Image (spheres, helix red, strand yellow):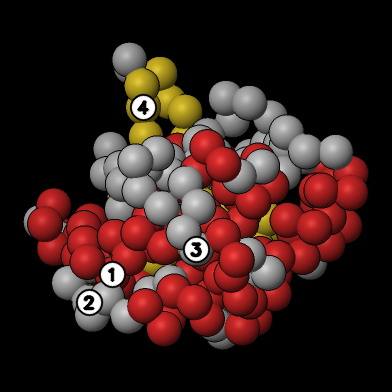
Amino acid sequence: MIHLENIRHQYNGQTVLDLPHFACAVGEHWLILGNSGSGKTTLLHIIAGLLSPAEGSVHIAEAELTAMSGTACDRFRGRHIGIVFQQLHLLPTLTVGENLLIAPYLAGLPQERERVAEVLQSLEIADKIHAYPHQLSYGQRQRVAIARAVINNPRLILADEPTSALDDRHCQQVLELLLAQAQRHQATLVIATHDRRLKDRFEKQILL
């Protein structure tokens, strides 16, 4: 599913990521663990095709992202990769349902309101479909962000620091939601975090 070779990246002449090899099979769950500044968010963005590495190749589902044009990479990402960002990036002027419908629109996929309702129901926030982000609690907004990440039935789900700002109870809730959604969609899951509370839940890990 994921195959990285000789990945290196620099900022201002300083190497922030040096990863000779990483391979991840379909349906596996991986944790990228490291302190702030260790390169884990950089690695996640490279896997997502949001950032091109200074060196190396990135293959996702047999497609080489590092050989694609920007437009082709954007389209591939929209159709095959779901991302839960550390900053949730929900559009404040759109309802929950409208925020979700943007994802298939940008990926060139049909906008199916039944699919929106189905995903929100699976995350137990179906009653918030007409609400605006400012009307939701932080936990509800985070569920909407997860819903947006899985709305297009992605083959790969990436999450950047989804639990680090949460207490123990909410940390476990969000982790269970991500694991459940990955299982539901038979997707590979990769979480990047410095939150060591997640360490015991993942057999497969990268320590940066």
Q: Which amino acid does label 4 sit on?
A: Gln
Residue at 67% from the left image edge and 55% from the top image edge = 31
Q: How many marks?
A: 4
Q: In which quarter of the image is the N terminus?
A: bottom left
Would you place residue 146 above or below residue 179 in this image? Answer: above
Distance between the alpha carbons at the discs numbered 3 and 1: 16 Å
Would you place residue 45 above or below residue 154 in this image? Answer: above
> Quick one: label 3, few (<14), some, or many (20+) residues within 10 Å?
some
Residues at discs 4 and 3 in contact (Cβ within 8 Å): no
Q: What residue type is labelled 3?
A: Ile
Q: Viewer-nearest of labels 4 and 2?
A: 2
Residues at discs 1 and 2 in contact (Cβ within 8 Å): yes
Mark 3 and mark 2 lie on one chain; the one further toward the N terminus is 2
Q: What residue type is labelled 1?
A: Pro
> Quick one: label 4, few (<14), some, or many (20+) residues within 10 Å?
some
Distance between the alpha carbons at the discs numbered 4 and 1: 33 Å
Say which element carries label 1.
helix
Q: Viewer-nearest of labels 3 and 1?
A: 3
Q: Which mark is residue 129?
A: 3
Distance between the alpha carbons at the discs numbered 3 and 2: 20 Å
Residue 49 in view: yes
Distance between the alpha carbons at the discs numbered 4 and 3: 42 Å
Q: Mark 1 points at which residue?
A: 104
Distance between the alpha carbons at the discs numbered 4 and 2: 35 Å
Left or right: residue 201 compared with residue 70: right
Q: Residue 109 carries which label?
A: 2
Q: Name the residue under label 4.
A: 10
Say which element carries label 2.
loop
Residue 150 position in % (x across, y down):
48, 70
Q: Viewer-nearest of labels 4 and 3?
A: 3
Residues at discs 4 and 1 in contact (Cβ within 8 Å): no
Residues at discs 3 and 1 in contact (Cβ within 8 Å): no
